[in-house]
Image (spheres, rainbow, N blue to C red):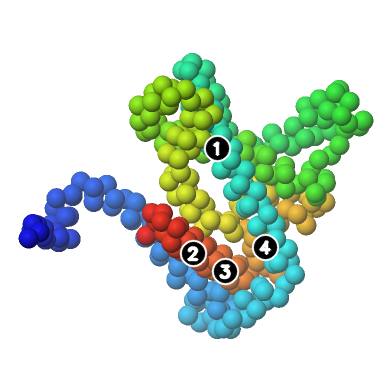
Amino acid sequence: MKPTTALVPKPSFWRLLVQQKAWFWMAVPWALYCIVFNYLPLWGWLMAFQDFRPAKDFWSQEWVGLQWFEMLFTRPGFWLAMRNTLVMSLLNLVLGFVTAIGLALLLSEVRNRGFKRTVQTLSYLPYFVSWVVAANIVFYVLSLEGPLNSLLVWLGIQKDPMIYLAKGELFWPILAISNIWKNVGWNAIIYLAAIATINPELYEAADMDGASRFQKIRYITLPAIRSTFVLLLVLSLGHLLSAGFDQPYLLMNPTVKEYAVNLDVYVFTEGLMSFGGKPNFSYGTAAGIFKAVVSLVLIWGSNKILKANGGKGLF
C-alpha cells in the first residue's frame, strides 16, 4: 500500500491576514495609490461616448455613441501616429534590452570595485535628469557647432556640418540612441541584481572545467537571468503603444513632424488643440481607451504565450 499523507487545509483569507499582517499593511499605501490614480479615473472614459463640453454638467452632456472612435480610425493622422509609435517602441524595446543586458554583463565581469561603481554611477545618472534638460543636451550635441559635427568634420567623415534634427530619416535613430543614453544604466540594475544571486560555485566548477569567460556567460549567466528577462519583456509589451510624450515632443520640429508624432503626442496635438483651437476631451479619451485596450490584450496574449511554452506567467 502506498503511504498516505494528510491533506493540510488551506488557510482562510482572514487567517492569512492575521499571520501576515505586516505585509498587508505594507501593501495598503500602494493599493490606495492604484485605486485613487488608476481605477477611480476610469469613470472619465464615459467622455469618449459624449460630445463633452466642460461648461455643462457631466450627466447633461450629449451622448454620441461611437462617433469619436469612428473619427479616430478614419483620420490618416492617426495611422501615421500608430506607425511612428510602433517603430519608436520596437526600437526602444530591442535596443533597450540588448544594451541593458550587455552593460550588466560587462559590469559583472569587472573585478575592480572602485571602477565598477564609478561606471555604474555615471551610467544611471542621466536617468534622474528630466527630458527637458536631456533634450537641450541632445540639441547641443547635434547642433551645427556641437561636438558631434566638430568631431566628424575634423575626422573628415563629413565635409560640412549637418543639422541632424532636420532630417526625418534620422529622427528615429536619434530618439533611440538618446533614450538608451538616458535609461541604460537604470535598466541594467535589475540584471545586475539577478546576476548577483547566481551561485558562485557554478563559476568555480566552470573554471575547473576550463571554461572561458564567454562560455561562462553563455552557459551560466544568460540562462540564470532568463526568467528576469522574460518577465520584463512581458511587462514591456504592455507599453508597446506608449512610446512616451516628453522625448519626441521636445525634440520635434516642423521638418520631422511626420516621423515624430506618436500616439501620445497625437492625443495632445489633435485631441486637445486642433479642433478649431478648442480642446476636444472626448476625442482624446477615445484614443486613450484604444491604447489601454490594446495594451491589456498585449499583456494577456504575451502572458498566455509564455505559459504555453512552459514559462511562469504573471497571472
How many angstroms separate mark 1 from mark 2 (CA)? 25 Å
**Residue with the mark numbered 2:** 301
Marks 4 & 3, CB-CB < 8 Å contact: no
Residue drawn at point x = 88 percent, y = 31 percent: 158
Residue drawn at point x = 69 percent, y = 67 percent: 78
Q: Hey, what amino acid is under mark 3?
A: Phe
Outermost right residue: 159
Residue 290, labelled with which disc?
Answer: 3
Drawn side of residue 43 relative to residue 10, left or right: right
How many angstroms separate mark 3 from mark 2 (CA)? 16 Å
Residue drawn at point x = 72 percent, y = 44 percent: 173
For label 4, the crowd category at 10 Å Cα-Cα, with few meaning under 14, some 14 to 19 and many 20 or more, is some
Question: Mark 4 or mark 1: which is in front?
Answer: 1
- Position above or below: 15 against 67: above
Inspect this view and state whether residue 273 appears: no
How many angstroms separate mark 3 from mark 1 (CA)? 30 Å
Residue drawn at point x = 47 percent, y = 49 percent: 230
**Residue with the mark numbered 4:** 82
| Image x and y of residue 66, in percent | 59, 81
